[in-house]
Amino acid sequence: MSKPNPTSEELFNFPCDYPVKVMGKDCDELSVTMCSIIERHAGKLHPNQISSKKSSKGSYISYTVRIVATSRAQLDSINQELQDNPLVAYIL
């Protein structure tokens, strides 16, 4: 019989590849700040882990950063720090 409410640790099979998606105004500061926050929790990033796409009018940019997530607490910490940063408009 399966559990009715699996824990967040059970939903993910840690460690796992996980995309952190961040969107904000297109400025160099956003990229530097976002990478610094993620590296604090997930280790040094390699440029091939990061992809970006500008909005149609060029005012905003979205980043996808692929990390190896090790726990729900790690993901929660990354998300909270990103949410608290004024340069970040949205995270997924």
Image (tube, helix red, strand yellow):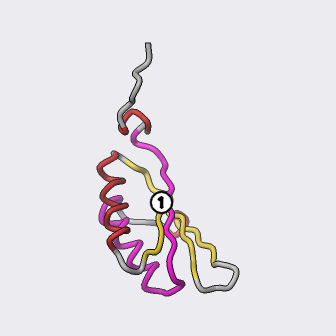
From this view, report whether residue 12 is shown above or below residue 27: above
Residue 81: % across, % down: 32, 67
Q: Which of the 4 quarters of the picture holds residue 3?
A: top left
- Residue span colored magenta: 14-42
From this view, report whether residue 75 is shown above or below residue 49: above
User: Disc 1 on helix, strand or loop?
Assistant: strand
**Residue 37 forms part of the magenta stretch:** yes
Residue 38: % across, % down: 37, 65
Q: Quadrant of the N terminus?
A: top left
Residue at (55% x, 65% y) in the render: 48
Residue found farthest to the top = 1
Observer-nearest of 72 and 50: 72
Residue at (46% x, 78% y) in the render: 31
Residue identifier under label 1? 20
Residue 80: % across, % down: 32, 62
Residue 20: % across, % down: 47, 60
Residue at (35% x, 73% y) in the render: 36
Which amino acid, by three-letter code, is at mark 1?
Val
Say left or right for 84 vs 17.
left
